[in-house]
Image (cartoon, rainbow, N blue to C red):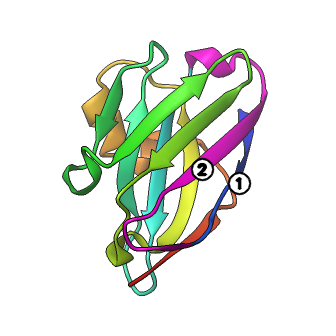
Amino acid sequence: QVQLVESGGGLVQAGGSLKLSCAASGRAFSIYTMGWFRQAPGKEREFVAAISSGGEPYYTVSVKGRFTISRDNAENTVYLQMNSMKPEDTAIYSCAASPFTAGLERISRDPRLFGSWGQGTQVTVSS
């Protein structure tokens, strides 16, 4: 188990950028698959991006080319750089850690495989 704390959310205009951080405490951060999910008001939680222990990224189609997920294992931190933001990106963004490592796409599409979650950070994009 790892404990996760997100930061970096806020208000940004459409077309702008934000960078979210997720600091992890606990053992063996480097072996976890890390993911970012978001939940907009009145909508179900959706997958945004994930990164394998080896640094391979995977994105949902709607953010591909705009968002970049990265990790710094020395700092026990995963990042989500969000560029060219749109009002529909408005949501609470949460990071999550999965102990599963095989099949990044499969892991990304099943939130049940993520055993640790942060409390979330609000991102609001104004039009």
Residue 72 can be seen, yes or no: yes
* Image marks 2 and 1: residues in contact by CB distance under 8 Å: yes
Residue 61 in percent (x, y) is at: 19, 50
Q: Is residue 14 magenta?
A: yes
| Stretch in magenta | 12-31
Callout 2 secondary element? strand
**Where in the figure is residue 126, as x and y percent of width and height?**
45, 82
Q: Of the residues shown, which amino acid type is indicated by label 2?
A: Leu
**60, 28: nearer the viewer:** 60
Q: Residues within 10 Å of mark 1 (few under 14, many from 20)?
A: some
Give the structural element (helix, strand or loop) at label 1.
strand
Nearer to the camera, 11 or 111: 11
Residue 7: assigned label? 1
* Residue that badge 2 annotates: 20
Above-or-below relation of 7 to 16:
above
Residue lying at 25% horizontally and 46% vertically, measured from the top left: 64
Q: Quadrant of residue 79?
A: top right
For the image shown, how many numbered marks are present on the structure? 2
Sort mark 2 into few (<14), some (14-19) or many (20+) by Cα contacts within 10 Å: many
Looking at the image, which residue sits at the far left? 61
Looking at numbered disc 1 in the image, what kind of residue is underneath it? Ser
Please report the residue visible at 26 percent of the width from the left and 33 percent of the height from the top.
105
Asked if residue 114 can be seen in this view, the reply is no
**Vertical position of residue 55 compared to residue 45: above or below:** above
x and y percentages locating residue 94 in the rendered image:
57, 56
Looking at the image, residue 50 sits to the left or right of residue 6; the answer is left
